[in-house]
Amino acid sequence: MQHPSDLRHDVLMNRDEKTMPDLKALIQAEHYDEGWNRLLDEARSETDYTRFLSLCRWHRRLEARAPQRVTKTVKLALLGGASTEMLEAPLRLAVASLGLGCQIHRSSYNLFAQEMLDPGSATAAFAPDVAVIVSTPANMPAWPEPGDDLDRVQALVDEACEHWLGLCDRFHAHTPCEIVLNNFHALPTRPMGNLGAKLPWDANNFLRRVNLALGDRAPNYVHLNDVEGLAAQYGVRHWFDPRYWFHAKQPVSFEALVPYVRNTARIIAALFGYTAKCLVLDLDNTLWGGVVGDDGPEGIKIGEGDAVGEAFKAFQEYIRALKQRGILLAVCSKNEDANARAPFRELPEMVLKENDFLAFKANWEPKPNNLREIAAELNIGTNALVFVDDNPAEREIVRQWLPEVRVVDLTEDPAEYPRLLDDAGCFEITTLSNEDMQRVAQYQGNARRKQLQESVADYESYLQSLEQRAVIRPFEERYLDRITQLINKSNQFNLTTLRLSRSQVEERMQDPNMLTAYVRVADRFGDNGLISVFCAERLGDELQIQLWLMSCRVLKRGVERLLCNYVAEQARAFGVSRLHGVYRPTAKNGLVRDLFPTLGFEAQRNGRAEEEATHWRLDLDHFSPFDVPIKHVEDY
Amino acid sequence: MTDADIWKSLTDIFRDLFEDPDLTIAPETTAADVEDWDSLTHIQLLVAIEQAFSIRFNTGEVAGLNDVGEMVALIARRTA
């Protein structure tokens, strides 16, 4: 354990008094891992720009001494209709704080249109994974004239959308990457006063229309950076400082620099699946006011009639909204189990119900142990957990033991909880698939499958009793979002851990030399959704497997054997005689180390060292299909 | 506020920002004399000065502050 208990004690008692060794001390003592954890944790929560910029300098120094250990580094092009110099270091740190490495190429001030249009530009040559376009109202191509009627204003809205989305389209045509585009914040002044709200040609009125149209028309690869919404939260006059615009064309005030880069970084991280899946909640003074073990269920504060009770109810409503968009919920509370469950069972005022939670840990074990168990039960990594607890000591111990867990700092006022969790932005997503909306039902189905498994004598008859049906097809446009999502977040059942952007997935879908496949599975307990992705490239007489991954939700159900049958059959139709598979070990994919031999592949020139990739071959002439307890159907 | 007060506060700001507890500044000190004093830290410096002295630099002044002497003179005028 790298957490000496004496240090932890100091930390728990005195975090606010700064007796904890600071970043500088950690780095000077060459405790680089702890230094990184500390830096990235502070970078996720620091709101003061002066201190954030100081963290940026520590980031640079730490990088020079001990580069961050990341599994993915993205290439970012920073294109500005404003000056972007000031954004570069903070954006790099904000992206790093979400676990992703990044390399930034910055175009010159206001040359972004030329850079985007020219296939030979330095930006195109950089071949970015993501282009971030920092535009402001000052870059609007045309504004309405006073007195323009609605038709004329609408034509200008169309023109503005064509300008921005057209640039994105032409750039994307020669440089297929994801694009993050600002929408527009309101202006700090209102020359038409209140009447502007009724006049389509009023500048603010016009900007609102442009923003709505951009949202309606942006294609899949354009992700809107909702500057309009963020600036409204911060106040436009705090967001934009005309002095630094006139002086240095700064797109946002220094005060707003951190929220802006953090918001941008979240979109970038979400594009590569770096987003949390599960919210783990404490109970006493987190979901309700008071301590249920002392006060009893009738004594705690929740619901109407009491201001504090209403504040906790509002927080529960916010959490319910997260659950409804597919975020998994779990409880982690130091309590007797019966006491912890009592409010859910006895109080109708509770917005959240017992069955909203997929894991319920109420005991006296250290919370990090419970968090590990929750992650294991839900088949997700601990880095997909967000931990919310009113007790600073519990937050600190989780930070120390499980630095990969996102910890949200609460204040002592429950009325602020929803905003604090919202500001933490842990659940950013760039698309909302049907899978997301149905996820909670799927996990509940899993719990029922487990019960069935316990009641059926042997595993094979259990699998038969599940009545599984599967659809296997080449990649299709309508599933590209989900396929991309799965490619970028699957860690365990993933043979190569190759990450791809949506555009790269689309290229493979269209490439006649690629054999692509997705698998959807349903059973008597419901639809498991799209859970497996495969892709291989024809090279001469063989098919080289680039990607083979599966959601752990359907582990040990026969899906991989069914897919192997399908691939073998398709490969013959493709005119090749063998499959070439590669297993690239990572810290998380030990699960599939022996997948290829299990499926009858033979070892090839394999590396000896543990960390080296292993190569495998399957001769199709000698392959006979597996007997699989899943019915292969056209659709279900 | 006396010039001595301004020098003391300004020195603290410099030491804090450049993370050097022994840093000394003089009227003729410029960006060339201080490691890490680049365009990024220059703006940070101005913003920190605004905060510490509760003053606001005008648009025209932001561009002109090139050495510490000019900064002190401007702070003295603003806080007078």
Image (cartoon, coloured by chain):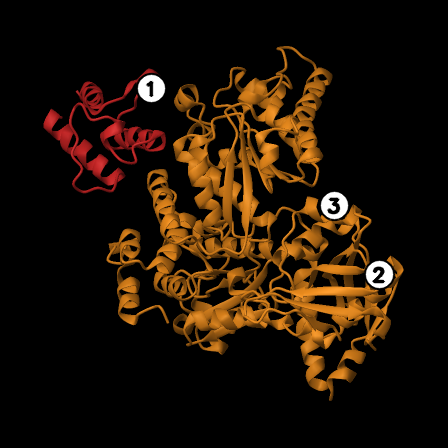
Chain colours: A orange, B red
Q: Which callout, 3 or 2, points at the residue further toward the start of the chain?
A: 3
Whether residue A346 is visible? no
Which is more toward the observer, A96 or A331? A96
User: Mark 2 falls on what kind of element?
Assistant: loop
Question: What percent of the width, then of the height, locates residue A198?
Answer: 62, 20
Which is more toward the observer, A369 or A286? A369
Name the mark nearer the viewer: 2 or 1. Answer: 2
User: Mark 3 falls on what kind of element?
Assistant: helix
Q: Is residue A490 left or right of residue A420?
A: right
**Residue matched to label 3:** A507
Which is more toward the observer, A616 or A373? A616
> Do discs 2 and 1 belong to a common subunit?
no
Question: What percent of the width, then of the height, locates residue A190?
Answer: 51, 19
Q: Identity of the amino acid at label 1?
A: Ala
Q: CA distance from mark 1 to mark 3?
A: 49 Å
Q: Relative to A462, say whether A41 is above or below.
A: above
Q: Identity of the amino acid at label 3?
A: Glu
**Residue matched to label 2:** A576
Q: Quadrant of the N terminus of chain A?
A: bottom left
**Figure disc tally:** 3
**Residue matched to label 1:** B63
Q: CA distance from mark 2 to mark 1?
A: 68 Å
- Name which residue lies at 22% across and 35% down: B14
Name the mark nearer the viewer: 3 or 2. Answer: 2
Res A57 quadrant in image: top left
Res A358 quadrant in image: bottom right
